[in-house]
Amino acid sequence: RDSSTSRGLGDVYKRQVTYCFTMASNNINIDENIFRDLQRFYGSIFNLPPLAAKIYAYLKFDFEKKGLTFEDLVEVFSASKSSVSESINLLLKHNLIKNSESYNERKRHFIINGDYVKIRFQEIVEKMESEIDILDRLHSYRNSPDESLNEKYSIYRLLLTKNIENIQDSLKKLYNEE
């Protein structure tokens, strides 16, 4: 039995493991524990297949936004070209990554889409606004004299409204749109 299995999780996370992947076009250092956590988190939250989650997590470590080519990703993950292509297309389709073409190279470089947070939260705002609209119409249609029910409706509507305002204010600050 490996001695690391007898240690607690805190001990495992205190140990920093850094890997350096060197390729023709890029050199990225990653922390293996953070990489695994990112992979699990984004795989779960975005419902990504394992390879797409790995690619997305890996690109999070491209702090200089130099990007990775298709060939780089095939090499790093030792995956088939068709699997990497499918994963890249899925990430592009969902606006999680974008192309970054350099003028001196014909190859496309893939980077994290810096606007994704804005896109994601704008979609959340639209869903909350739609819910408010539907609930307003339902509440009006019901026209209930029950004050307790009306108060709960008002509280819930206010919760949605305040969250919309909070998200919109935060997005303005994040993207310097004030």
Image (spheres, grey):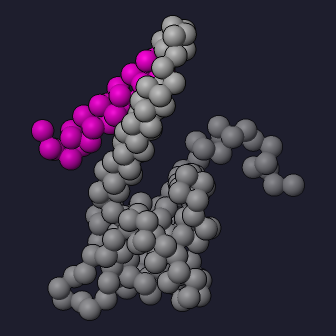
Task: Please name whichever residue, 58 or 132, is drawn nearer the observer in this view of the structure.
Answer: 132
- Residue at figure coordinates x 46%, y 76% from the top left: 88
Task: Please name whichever residue, 53 or 144, is drawn nearer the observer in this view of the structure.
Answer: 144
Q: Residue 124 magenta-drawn?
A: no
Point out residue 63 in the picture as x, y percentages from the top left corner: 33, 60
Q: Quadrant of the N terminus?
A: bottom right
Q: Is residue 77 above or below residue 13?
A: below
Res. 59 visible in picture: no
Point out residue 110 in the picture as x, y percentages from the top left corner: 36, 75
- Residue at figure coordinates x 25%, y 81% from the top left: 101
**Which residues lie in the magenta part?**
152-178
Q: Is residue 162 above or below residue 83?
A: above
Q: Quadrant of the C terminus?
A: top left
- Residue at figure coordinates x 42%, y 71% from the top left: 93
Q: In the drawing, does residue 82 fall left or right of residue 126?
A: right
Res. 114 visible in picture: yes
- Residue at figure coordinates x 51%, y 24% from the top left: 142
* Magenta residues, dominant SS class: helix
Q: In the drawing, does residue 144 fall left or right of residue 49?
A: left
Q: In the drawing, does residue 3 fall left or right of residue 67?
A: right
